[in-house]
Image (spheres, rainbow, N blue to C red):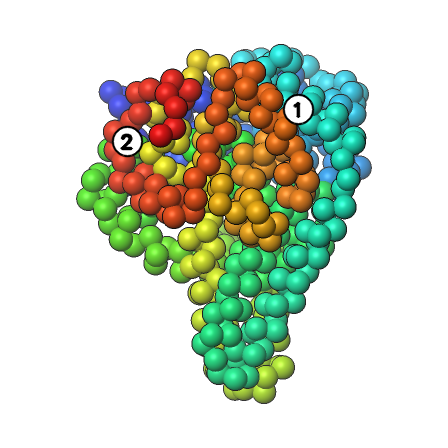
Amino acid sequence: MTPNIKDDGEWRVSGISRNYPSYRQNRPITSESWLEGKNVDDEAEGLWRINDTLYDLSDFAARHPGGSSWIECTRGTDITEPFESHHIEERARGMLSKFEVRKAARPRNYKFTLEENGFYMTLKRRVREKLRKIDYSPTKKTEFLHLGILVSVFLFSWAGTALDSLIFKGLAGLALCWVATSTHNYFHQRDNWRMYTFNLTMMNFRNWRISHALSHHVYANSLHDLEMSMFEPFLCWIPDRHYASKTQRLISVIISPVVYVVLFQGQFLIRLVLSLTKRNLLRWDDLIGFSLPIFIYLSTGVGLLSALLSWEIIISVGSFIFGLIGLTAAHHDPRILHDGDAQRQDFDWGLYQVDTIIDRGDIKWSDLLVLTHFGEHALHHLFPTLDHGVLKHLYPELRQTMKEFDVELREINHWSHIKGQNQQLLRIEKNPIPPGSKKLK
């Protein structure tokens, strides 16, 4: 499988953009190379682009309420959709004129629209009004759940090692996975201590802010989605035989459990190798990942080898469960829009998010399961900075807006998602029928 796909001498262009993503033309694909590719494609001239206007946010970065990293890492890119989805209140938009430099020389690379009377902006206005009235106390419950899961990682790790119990080690792995999935709630938000707990997995929240918050959340299921591209050639969800043959896709289904197992440590090893051979990608907070094996070794009194083996079991179990939950969460099913499928004529960004998601309908009864299994997924994509405990209060506004725009909120259970993801891995034929043309059966 090669990212350098050509058709009749031309790059295969994404359905949501004018150009084939530059970052996909080179390997390995990383968060850094994705940003470098956007600097080329977005034509922001080293500034920050919102719609067709360029802004200089250099001096504002240190004062940004969400943290300077969001501003610093997006220099030279188009941040139109992240800006709108991360700022529900209008204060940020009102400040933009202070930083305006000039109009962009060329039209946007992306086809998305955010018309004031379109789906997303209509929903956003209603959500803005609702947020002024609701009780934010559910966020305290979310914080309590996250803290409880974090503590359980260390308790189960200690018990599993001290008692040499595979059951407790398995529970420690589950808790470690749940730390990752629940911390995902926090690295979408302003800088906070909880986002650092994600690094216990050996992955790094800084990379995930790019690959997940800035890439996947904006360009879900497209060639611009870093969370799709990074898994190639091992897993390919793009329905096009030029990206993966039938044989390669069958192999993908077979080896997917192995991919799940190596997710955690694999991402760290890639950063380590690139840091040793090309340029340093490691940060001080990568050391947080080693706090768990150090804790196991110092608190249990077992030998170093036994402590490392116990940690390896825990992190492998956690990685497998994370892959099983994360890659089958809401996005991959033959009924879900992927790049190459026919798209609706209305390129409203909010409609695109809905088209690329089938939500989990079987976990809404539990705040814990919603937090740890990427629940309320459609609302989370539309308003990523909101705490998961708040999202459930926004369904009246979502359903009202969906009804007005004749859009369907699709829901299935996790088993159907697992089945659908395998079917999507095998799918080569593009869907010729745009979303909204037929109902989900």
Task: Give neighbour class at mark 1: few <14, some 14-19, many 20+ (Cα, 10 Å).
Answer: many
Tell which circle, 1 or 2, labels the residue nearer the N-terminal end: 1
Look at the picture and state if 258 lies above or below 240: below
Secondary structure under badge 2?
Answer: loop
- Amino acid type at circle 2 is Asp
Residue drawn at x 57%, y 47% is 365
What x and y, as percent, mark residue 28?
41, 46
In the image, residue 204 sits, relative to residue 76, either above or below, namely: below
Q: Residue at x 38, y 18 (%)?
A: 437
Front-most of 28 and 324?
Answer: 324
Visible in this render: residue 304?
no
- Which disc number belongs to residue 124? 1
From the top left corner, tell me how far across and down residue 349 is, in percent. Answer: 54, 23
Locate residue 43, reporting x and y percent.
55, 22
For the point 51% across and 74% down, the residue is 168
To which quarter of the image does residue 56 belong? top right
Position of the N terminus, as image quadrant, is top left
Most foreground residue, 389 or 403: 403
Q: Which structural element holds mark 1?
A: helix
User: Where's the C terminus, which quadrant?
Assistant: top left
Which residue is label 2 attached to?
A: 240
Give the spatial CA distance, label 1 vs label 2: 35 Å
Q: Nearer the viewer, mark 1 or mark 2?
A: 1
Amino acid bearing label 1: Lys
Relative horizontal placement of residue 25, taking residue 142 as reference (left or right) = left
